[in-house]
Amino acid sequence: MSDEIRHEWPLFEVFVRAKRGLNHVHVGSLRAADHEMALHHARDLYTRRNEGVSIWVVRSDDVVSSGPDDKDAFFAPSGDKAYRHPTYYAIPDSVPHI
Amino acid sequence: MTDERVFEETIAKDQRVEPRDWMPDGYRRTMIRQIAQHAHSEIIGMQPEGAWITRAPTLRRKAILLAKVQDEAGHGLYLYSAAETLGADRGDLTRRLIEGRQKYSSIFNYPTLTFADVGVIGWLVDGAAICNQVPLCRSSYGPYARAMIRICKEESFHQRQGYELLMTMMRGTPAQREMVQDATDRWWWPSLMMFGPPDEESPNSAQSMAWKIKRHSNDELRQRFVDMSVPQAEALGVTLPDPALRWNPGRDHYDFGEIDWAEFKRVISGGGPMNAERLAHRRRADEDGAWVREAAAAHAAKRAEARA
Amino acid sequence: MSFDDAYDALTDHDDDARWAYGTGFSDPLAGVPTAVPDGVDPADLAAYCLMLGDDALVMSHRLQQWVTRAPELEDEMALANIGLDLLGQARLLLSRAGEVEQAGIEQAGFENAGGPARDEDALAYLRDPADFRNVRLAERADEDFAHLVARLLVFATWRLALLDRLTSSRDPVLAAIGAKGVKEATYHREYAAGWVVRLGDGTDLSHTRMRAAVDAVEPPAGELFEPHEVELRLAAAGVAVDPSALREEYDGVLAEVHRVATLPPPPPFEAATVGAGRDGVHGPELVEILNEMQELARAVPGGVW
């Protein structure tokens, strides 16, 4: 945005593990002065309905992400590796539990 | 394929646009404006109900109301978070709000005169908001759509608690029943205005529909809200303040009276009973908090320096 | 999710895991026996529940007054959470007070035995200031955010130490309330301590304000450690906590927070110049709180909400 006014606190991305056995999931962001405060805020904002057994916070400007332009270079090469997918292997219907 | 083609195909295939994708400037601007206004509405919307937390007449109602107003702060934060993925800065958006350069829903410029208003806000205002918001869960901008899903799930309790409060009050004293009717009379028409101007006077709507930022027209959603609210009012035992309201079997919808669009325009451009107070209150909180936020930033900087 | 019917869409909960959106709420008193423990005077136990309940109710009220006024939206969330936690504790404790009071009436065989117990709302809304038993710290108004966090640090540090000991109370209800409250108060203390440190260490302005706040809030806090006779009797019976035993833990925490916050060591307690809140002696601030809290409930006699 064109204006000079910036928030006093940096932005943090928040990841919550909803329950044991699941990955941390990105749930959104928040503002905090430091990591400690960010964790507290994340608890108050993103887990007030008992969501979550674990929280990660990461400074948004520390997140390195692949850009949409990298899409082909990053993700297309695995497109031809069908052998990574279970349906690649023909198993007769008569074989159970596989 | 050009960036623009990729964007158009994403929209055409009903897929989501994500933060780092290329998008037309107009789309980004519209999205930031819409999300920011939505966020501002949540934050300003804390005030009318927040005024009743300390005065709630039972501890159960007090807990419900405090949790609800807290949710509204949370919803504001989810939405500011979505706006920030587009390159907006919350500090800047807050400034735009308190300087009156960005709008919020005009419904919050009406006062809450009795505790029945808390119930009616839940029933009608949150009901209208839900009608508006559920389709936004499919909005083309990913972070906004995801924020809306979370918000809609959490808001399901907001509307129910309001209606339940009104049902309880209707079983109470005659004075309480009068309070419910009076609050219904005052909030019905402003609730209908929450869907925005009629379709033929809604200049940005066509582009927003094409971009799938919006999924239904203002009038369509308004009609849906009226159709849902009439049987709810009957079950409650209140009269909606519109003599023209009647079932039209030909249309399979309720017909309803003319909305006072002059009032809508007056309130949205600052002439409502509470506009000045709502903004002044928000400005005061922001200004009174500045030294606190600065102190936290200064402390964090000192800590970081000590570690380095 | 169905998009054609708003209400169907909202009750459709099949994809919750994806959203890290939880369920599973529990009643902290489920299955806890409610009989008054042997050898305990129900009137004492009821009075004690009122003391701890009123502390939470009145402190929660002050936090509710911060809603829409916090320095940042994230702190709106935090302060509301703390207010809700304390309100929850107050409801459990007031309900317990009413229930035990009624048990005492039955036990004494009074004429009106069998009448309804006073519930949480009767106790919150229909008592006058002189019947409130909260410590006066809870009712104090906050001049600014520094005063609020100074007061919350004192309150939460003391209450955490108290609730922690209450978990081994012979009254199973108090023990369960203690267990629930310990988790909450731990967070309250951490939140308050975090802010006292940030403001104490932050800028010159915040340091000055934080120092003024602790100088105003901490010296009168000696009342928190003065045992009331009810507390002494119940502590001897293994039911309540003697607050004078909490002093060491409190002093240790406060000294450490002050040190990290670059504040001078905590000022000494001043001799009490006013009556004790535990005896129902309160300042005009409680009157103001109750006027606000009770106004509507009292204005509509027979109202149901």
Image: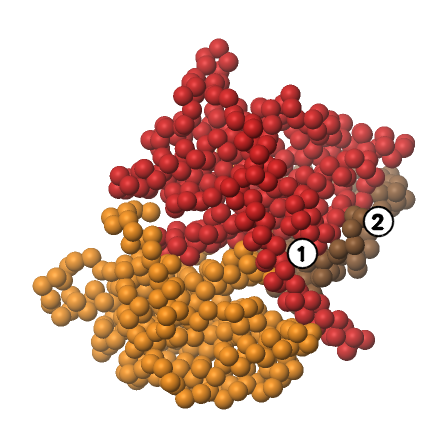
Chain colours: A brown, B red, C orange
Q: Chain of mark 2?
A: A
The residue located at (34%, 52%) in the rendering is: C296
Q: Which mark is residue B286?
A: none
Is residue C231 among the parts visible in the rendering? Answer: yes
The percent coordinates of residue B69 (x first, y second) are 51, 51
Q: Would you identify the image quadrant in which residue C203 lies?
A: bottom right
The residue located at (60%, 82%) in the rendering is: C258
The percent coordinates of residue A60 (x first, y second) are 76, 57
Disc 1 residue type (three-letter)? Leu
| Residue C183 in the figure: left or right of residue B286 | left
Q: Chain of mark 1?
A: A
Q: Secondary structure at mark 1?
A: strand
Q: Would you identify the image quadrant in which residue A62 lies?
A: bottom right
Q: Earlier in the sequence, mark 2 or mark 1?
A: 1
The residue located at (47%, 18%) in the rendering is: B255
Q: Would you identify the image quadrant in which residue C90 lies?
A: bottom left
The percent coordinates of residue C121 (x first, y second) are 31, 57
The percent coordinates of residue C13 (x first, y second) are 54, 41
**Disc 2 to disc 1: CB gap under 8 Å:** no
Q: Are marks 2 and 1 on the same chain?
A: yes
Q: Which residue is mark 1?
A: A30
Q: Which residue is mark 2?
A: A66
Marks 2, 1: nearer the viewer: 1
